[in-house]
Image (cartoon, rainbow, N blue to C red):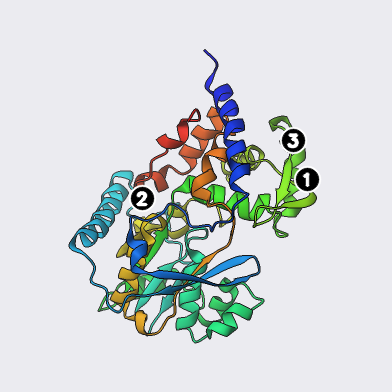
Amino acid sequence: MAPRVTKRRLASALFLLLFLSLYMSQGEESGIPSDGSLEMRRRMPVKKDRKDLIESVTLPDRWNTSKAHLEELNARRQHVQETCRKLGLDHPSPTNKLNAWEFLYNKEYNLLWCNVFKAASSTWFWNFNLLAGYTEKQLVKAKAAPVELARKRYPRPTVDEVQEIMANNPSPISFMITKHPFLRLVSAYRNKILAGNAIYTPLFKKIYRKYKHLGPPVPRRMKDGSLAGTGISPSFSQFVQYILDKEANGKSLDMHWIPQSRFCTPCLANFSIYAKTETLDEDGNHIIFSSGINHVIKPKTINRSVDVPTSKVAHVFICQLSEQQFDALVKLYQYDLQLFQYDVEPFRNCTT
C-alpha cells in the first residue's frame, strides 16, 4: 500500500483540477456557510473597493435570540471555561499572560471585542469604526487600513484596563470570533502569500532557498484568482514549514496565523460570547441587538478575497502537506481545536 503522503499528493493533483475550475466563477470569501440564518439578513453587493467585496447587510427590524441559540452560546462558553481549567490555562503565569493588544472597547455601548485577523475582522472593524464616528463614505474611501483607523479612536488598552473593563457593573458584552484554524491558515496564505502582499514578499526568497527541497514555488494569483503575470509565491507546503520552524525555534508568529487562543487568551479573558464565522449571521445579530448598536451601525460584510471561498478549496492546500506537517499543524493549533471545538478529521482524507 502506498504511504499516506503519496496518497495526499495524488489527491492534491485531483483537487487542484477542481480548484482551477472553480476559479472560473467568482464567489466571495465567506468561510463555512451558516445554517440557514442568511435568510435573516438580505445582502446586496454595493462596491468592490481595493479588490474587496463590500456587501450591504439589511438587519431585521427586531431580533429575539432563540432559546436553542442561547443554549449553544452558553455551552460554548462553559466548554471554554472547563477546557481551560483542564489544560491549566485559567490562571496567569510568566508564560500565560492576558494579551490585551487586540482588544477594542466602545464605552458608550459597553462592548469589548478581541479582534482575530482572518475571522470576520474586516466586517467588525467596519462596525467599530462606525461606532467611533467615521462615516460610511470615509471608510470606503480611506487609504489607511481599517485597523489603523480604529486605533486612532480606540487606543490599545493595557492588561489592567482590560481587567477593569471586564469587572464593570454592568458587565460588558465581551466577545471574540473564531474560525477553524486550518481554514484561517489557508485564507491567510491565499490573501497574504499567494497573492503576493507587498508586506510579505521580502520573505519569499528566503523561503524559496530554505525550503527548495519541498518543491518549486507556485504561480502568483491575485485576490480575484487571476494569475499575476510571471510572479511566483512560496508553495503552501513551503509556507507551512516556514511557520512550523518559527514555532519550533520559539519565534513570534504573524498575527494572521498565530493561534487564536494565543492571540486573544480566552482562558484569561473569559469572554461572554464566543462567536464563530461558521454561524456568524446568527451570532452577529445576537451581539448587535443585545448591545443596542443596531440603531447606529449600517453593517457590511467585507471579504478580502473575492474569488472561490476558502471553505471550498481548503483541501486543495491541506492535501499538499506531508503527514508530518499535518500532524505538526494539529499540535500548533491544538488549543484552538480543543477550546473552540473544531475537527481536523475531514482534512485527513485526501482521497475524496
Say which of 111 and 266 sits in front: 111
Which residue is label 2 attached to? 340
Q: Locate residue 126 relative to residue 249 in the image: left or right.
A: left
Local crowd size for mark 1, using a 10 Å CA cut-off: few (<14), some (14–19), many (≥20): few
Q: Is residue 94 visible?
A: no
Q: CA distance from mark 1 to mark 3?
A: 12 Å
Mark 3 vs mark 2: which is more N-terminal?
3
Q: Look at 64% across and 65% down and name the residue there.
A: 51
- Residue 135 screen position, x and y as percent: 53, 86
- The residue at which mark 1 appears reads as 205
Q: Is residue 33 above or below residue 50?
A: above
Identified at 49% across, 27% down, the residue is: 351
Q: Nearer the viewer, residue 350 or 24?
A: 24
Q: Is residue 64 visible?
A: yes
Q: Earlier in the sequence, mark 1 or mark 3?
A: 1
The circle drawn on residue 216 is 3
Image location (x, y in percent) of residue 32 = 43, 51
